[in-house]
Image (spheres, grey):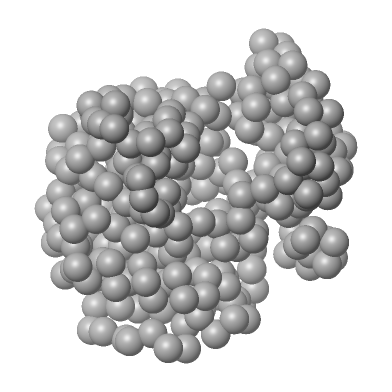
Amino acid sequence: MAEATHILILNYNSGASLADCLASLERSDARDLPVLIVDNASTDGSLDDLTIRDNLDVLRLSHNGGFAAGINAGVRVLLKRSVERVLLLNPDTCVGEGFLEPLQRALDEGAAIAGPKLLLPGQPARVWCAGGDVTFGLNMTRLRGHRSIDRGQFNDPCDVTFLPATVWLLSRSVWTVLGELDERFFCYLEDVDYCIRATGAGNRIRYEPRSVVVHVGSFASGGGYTPLRKYLNALGSCALLRKHGNLRRWLSFVLFDVVTTPAAMLYGLFRRRPAAAWWKIRGLWDGFRGRSMTEQRLQELLPGARS
């Protein structure tokens, strides 16, 4: 059903990585699939130098409403085109030559969402995520094999409770039954929420290691251990618990995330980035008070949260 599959890429100030992602698609078994790029009001010119091909469309949004809002806007367009399967793909990825077929097969065999083995760039090859689990502990999830050398120890396909939305293949029927991504999360944790909703409704989430994608990095928030990312993760964790939490889950979060914040501060000092830990505390405080992220508030925070 490859002809019924459409690729959706959300762009927000992705720089040259977007062109690199599209170039990797041209070398892959997804080279003939239509691509829709949804642009969240980028200001870095990342769309300016793209080679526009016949099966590539761009949807330019007037403002940055966050990851979930951008994806939702794109999926609405695709559903009107009667697309049967949507491949969500981050612009900071480079796909392997045969990455698509194993994901398609996973859906053919009954999975609701399928995702690949995600590797970090460079050699030796290291795993970024080989599927994962929703834990409601530190960062809400556990990424299997995170930063371990890839020796084939995660080469068995299996059902998991979490796959990051870095790369998702999902069917039209799943989207129409579960609904859209929850835009209250703005950025981060919306994929955790969606996986909880999917498994709660009896759907299977399939990790497929025969599909390999390199995850170059998170450009929109400036990378992994930054003030902005730690703030948004903390804010989203509280929102996730307000939505899905019970006593056990709240206790797990407090014990493994909140109580460990002093250790995170020491880690930040060790990496000479102490501001990240302070912004995590700020995110927890705002999250416990029920504050949410908006584009205006993000712009107010950015000057202090980028370093």
Name which quarter of the figure residue 261 lies in: top right
Q: Position of residue 95 (x, y in %)?
A: 29, 58
Indicate left or right for 146 with 210 as reference: right
Q: Residue at x 63, y 32 (%)?
A: 139
Q: Quadrant of the C terminus?
A: bottom right
**Total number of numbered discs in the rendering:** 0
Q: Is residue 80 visible?
A: no
Where is residue 254 shown, x and y percent of the image? 76, 20
Q: Is residue 66 left or right of 239 when viewed as pictured?
A: left
Of residues 167 and 123, the one nearer the viewer is 123
Of the pair 40 and 98, the residue shown nearer to us: 98
Q: Is residue 243 above or below residue 116?
A: above
In the picture, measured across the screen, residue 67 lies left or right of residue 35, that is right
Q: Residue at x 39, y 59 (%)?
A: 93
Nearer to the camera, 226 or 235: 226
Query: Residue 273 vs residue 289: left or right?
Result: left
**Image height check: is 57 above or below 228?**
below
Coordinates of residue 159 in the picture (x, y in percent): 31, 25
